[in-house]
Amino acid sequence: MDSVLLVSSSDKESKIATQLLKESGYKSVYCTESGSNARRLIKDNSYDLIVVNTPLIDEFGHELSIMASETSNSGIILICKTDIVEDIAEKVGYYGVFVVLKPLNKSNFLQSITLVTTTRQRMLGLSKGESKLQLKSEEIRLVNRAKRALMQYLKMTEPQAHRYIEKQAMDTRQTKIEVAKRILTTYES
């Protein structure tokens, strides 16, 4: 855990939140008072966690948390008063924003940080798995296109085309994707 963006217009609450974040293991806590400045920082930097303490000096803050969830991979915590928490949670819950009640309770806030951080790590892991599946799917599509080209132009059977691609990959120390691309360049150009 490296960096947090804390967006808060209250110095007192910023100090408390910063202390609790550092206790949670975050090394760098960057603070700003406004939603507009936070938007710029989110656009230009990557944060592990974004904490928005409502209201801000130029907006309430729930719009900022929604924007952050749509444009970053950060975990997001929105802090708001008890009397409006249900309305705000309804607006931001769909976006994966975690809502925490004011005033900050140390154990609840630390537990929220842990929950958001764990959820973020899980989501990042799923994203990596999805990327691997997409690469494997792309490999299968390319190899199948190459097999069809070999079957059409060299009159090979499907098992012969498959074996040819595998053997070429082993003999030339290339991946099946590289061999398939070379075949497609030869026969589909």
Image (cartoon, rainbow, N blue to C red):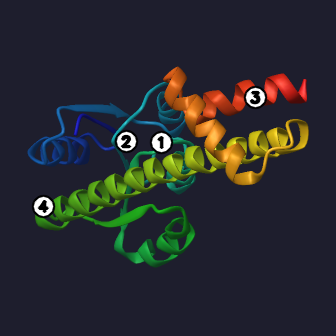
**Is any part of residue 60 visible from this angle?**
no
Instruction: Please name the residue that numbered disc 3 is placed on.
Output: 183
**Three-letter amino acid code at the position of disc 2:** Ser
State yes or no: discs 4 and 3 in contact (Cβ < 8 Å).
no
Q: State which mark lies toward you, 3 or 1.
A: 3
Disc 3 from disc 2: Cα separation: 61 Å
Instruction: Please name the residue that numbered disc 2 is placed on.
Output: 9
Instruction: Please name the residue that numbered disc 1 is placed on.
Output: 57
Q: Nearer the viewer, residue 96 or 175?
A: 175
Mark with earlier residue (3, 1): 1
Q: Is residue 143 left or right of residue 104?
A: right
State yes or no: discs 1 and 2 in contact (Cβ < 8 Å).
yes
Disc 2 from disc 4: Cα separation: 20 Å
Residue 75 image point, x, y percent: 38, 51
Disc 4 from disc 1: Cα separation: 25 Å
Q: Secondary structure at mark 2?
A: loop
**Three-letter amino acid code at the position of disc 1:** Ile
Q: Secondary structure at mark 3?
A: helix
Mark with earlier residue (4, 1): 1
Q: State which mark lies toward you, 4 or 1.
A: 4
Q: What residue is rendered at 9% in x and 46% in y?
A: 23
